[in-house]
Amino acid sequence: MDRIKFLGDVKIRPTLIQLLNLGMIICSALMIWKGLMCITGCESPVVVVLTGSMEPGFKRGDILFLHMNKEPIRAGEIVVYNVDGRDIPIVHRVIKAHERRDTGEIDILTKGDNNQVDDISLYSGGQLWLNSHHIIGRAIGYLPYVGYLTIIMTEMPIVKYLLIGVLALLVITSEE
């Protein structure tokens, strides 16, 4: 009987408003992300540095802002790339870039600043160079250590679920 009384006390209109607010927050975040994709020309305009391979320039947990344009990639630039068969993008510096005269395609060789050897061992089997379709974007700025929350949530999924639960509880139980 108490359960029925509790269900009768729940006000449907404020609950629906809270759920709509939660939906608007999620939609707003997605619109901002898609807007950044259009402005920067990158499929992933923001990435987190996951390893120390780019130290001392970028440390683990730094957030990088990316941009991609039509200009050819040159040696010395820091790029984020994806190789076939790997889901996680890699942040490294271009050490060699060769433009093919016949096609105009650029062959790129990368290396982490803190690594002893180039990245050929990270590329797909038998691949010696990256091409422009592997490049996600060029690093144009960064925020130090801000991405550690992402790393913690990836390495300890319970933290992610707790954070999502707390945020959902705050949205649902707030008065406004």
Image: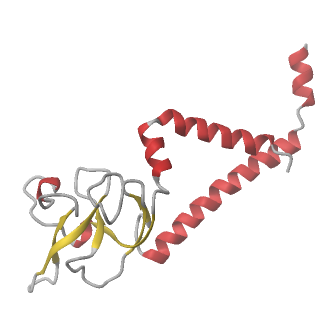
As drawn, 69 above or below 3: below
Establish if 20 lies above or below 57. above
Judge left or right: residue 176 versus residue 22. Answer: right
What is the quadrant of residue 53 in the picture? bottom left
Percent coordinates x, y for residue 165 in the rendering: 64, 37
Question: Depth check: 146 or 85 in front?
Answer: 146
**Residue found at x 74% / y 42%:** 170
Q: Quadrant of residue 121?
A: bottom left
Query: What residue sits 29% from the left and 60% below the top?
Result: 55
Is 169 drawn above or below residue 115 in the view shown?
Answer: above
Q: How many marks?
A: 0
Q: How is the image coloured?
A: secondary structure
In the picture, measured across the screen, residue 152 lies left or right of residue 55, that is right
Q: Is residue 134 left or right of residue 38?
A: left
- Quarter of the image where the N terminus is located: top right
The residue under the point 22% across, 55% down is 84
Q: In the image, what residue occupies the spot 60% across and 59% down?
A: 29
- Residue 98 lies, in percent from the top left, at 12, 79
User: In this view, which residue lies farthest toward the front?
Assistant: 56
Residue 94, position as x, y percentages in the image: 21, 71
